Image (cartoon, grey):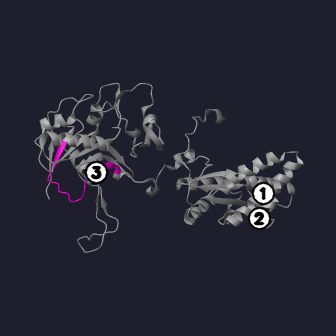
Amino acid sequence: MSVELLPVRGLPEVEAGADLAELIAAAADLRDGDVVVVTQKVVSKAEGRLVQADDDDWVARETRRVVARRGDLVIAETRHGFVCANAGVDHSNVAEGFLTLLPDDPDASAERIRAGLAERTGASLGVVITDTFGRPWRRGQVEVALGCAGLPAMLDLRGTKDAAGKVLEATIIAVADEVASAAGLVAGKADGIPAVVVRGLRFDDPAGAAADLVRPREEDLFPTSPLHAISARRTVRAFGGGTIPRAALEEAVAAALTAPVPHGSRHRSRPWVWVVLESSAARRRLLTAMAEAWARDLRADGATEATIARRRDRSDALLGEAPVLAIPSLSLGAADVYPDERRREAEREMFLLATGAAVQNFMLALHAQGFGSAWVSSTLFCKEEARAALGLSEEWLPMGAVAAGTPAGEAPPRPPAGPESHLRFA
């Protein structure tokens, strides 16, 4: 197979409402099998996705999720699922004071152009809409496919054999992206060439959509930057179905054990144990013991039975229904290393602080793996009962409980709050 790249010259300046199929058909000699590659910029202009660069934060409005941030640069996931700089909001090749936004539905845009070209030329064509993206771990930018029609977006070679006769197990070719990148070689940024004809391609696979190229969330090993993962973690109190694999819990405990402890060189074993309640019987045993202890204390304080029932129901709604319930416990014996009570008390306080860091690490590690969690202090109000229900010796102090699992839905955005009121310099 040999491929030609033919720039489409002479297209006029594109304005809102322009018929791109008509403009391209008039400027290019199209044949059966050609793939017409069109830049996102002219598609956005034709579809009226040109906005004024006023005080509106267009990047925030076009962002579904921030992946990473450094200074003014934001790597964001758009509502399409694309992960790109500034959510695709761009000021290049437009008039001063204006910005372009990505098309609302690039695959639908590609199909409209393809249908319009077929109507005008009678040719069977493919269309790819492209934009320029950076790439993780590599310098420089390449063109990628935002929209695709009339050709396969991907070529799945799994199950076929390579030249040496070995069966391919993971090879899926991003055809639309390769076409987009090839066209970018002749559509220079400063040359005013918004369309390229790619000739000579042959495909046996059925046509697809560029949306097929977006990696599903569950396959994403790098969903957020480490810094953003810290601030993006939210307390989750409603969980969906499914549980958390043991391997993910082991990763979370490994992260928890990296928390700093007093005199770290002396406590290399780390003074914590995490009790994960997998069986409903174990969970019910703990919740029943806690409820009885709370009821006793609340009755002593004069609470009504209705108040006691509400407290129990709130606990059951979270701790009883979460897919995973993990109880972090601190070894009190780890603090008893000084002969005098004053220093032992200070050591205990330091270990309590360190346990908070361990719990935070545990929850952050779950978040980094796509799971949500909530820390509840309940066991601290009934230490002896919780310890007995968990089968722990008197050495151990249950430090609350972490309810965890897959969130039932997207967490609401965190209310804007800068660090200014919480930061002091001396």
Residue type at the position of mark 3: Asp
Q: What's drawn in magenta, residue-wise? A: 196-211
| Callouts 3 and 2 close, C-beta under 8 Å | no
Q: What residue is rendered at 80% in x and 58% in y?
A: 383
N-term-proximal mark, 3 vs 2: 3
Q: What residue is rendered at 37% in x and 39% in y?
A: 88
Q: Where, by quadrant of the figure, is residue 104 drawn?
A: top left
Residue farthest toward the front in the current orientation of the protein? 306
| Callouts 1 and 3 close, C-beta under 8 Å | no
Disc 3/disc 2 C-alpha distance (Å): 57 Å
N-term-proximal mark, 1 vs 3: 3
Q: Nearer the viewer, residue 369 or 138?
A: 369
| Callouts 2 and 1 close, C-beta under 8 Å | yes
Q: Residues within 10 Å of mark 2 (few under 14, many from 20)?
A: some
Residue type at the position of mark 2: Ala
Spot occupied by residue 163 in the image (x, y as percentages of width and height): 23, 71
Q: Is residue 27 left or right of residue 103?
A: left
Task: Examine the residues drawn in magenta and state their main secondary structure.
Answer: loop
Q: Which residue is mark 1?
A: 290
Q: Which residue is mark 2?
A: 389
Element carrying mark 3: helix
Q: Which image quarter holds the C terminus? A: top right
Q: Is residue 372 visible?
A: yes
Residue type at the position of mark 1: Met
Q: Is residue 404 left or right of residue 121?
A: right
Spot occupied by residue 94 in the image (x, y as percentages of width and height): 29, 29
Q: Which image quarter holds the N terminus? A: bottom left
Q: Which residue is mark 3?
A: 177
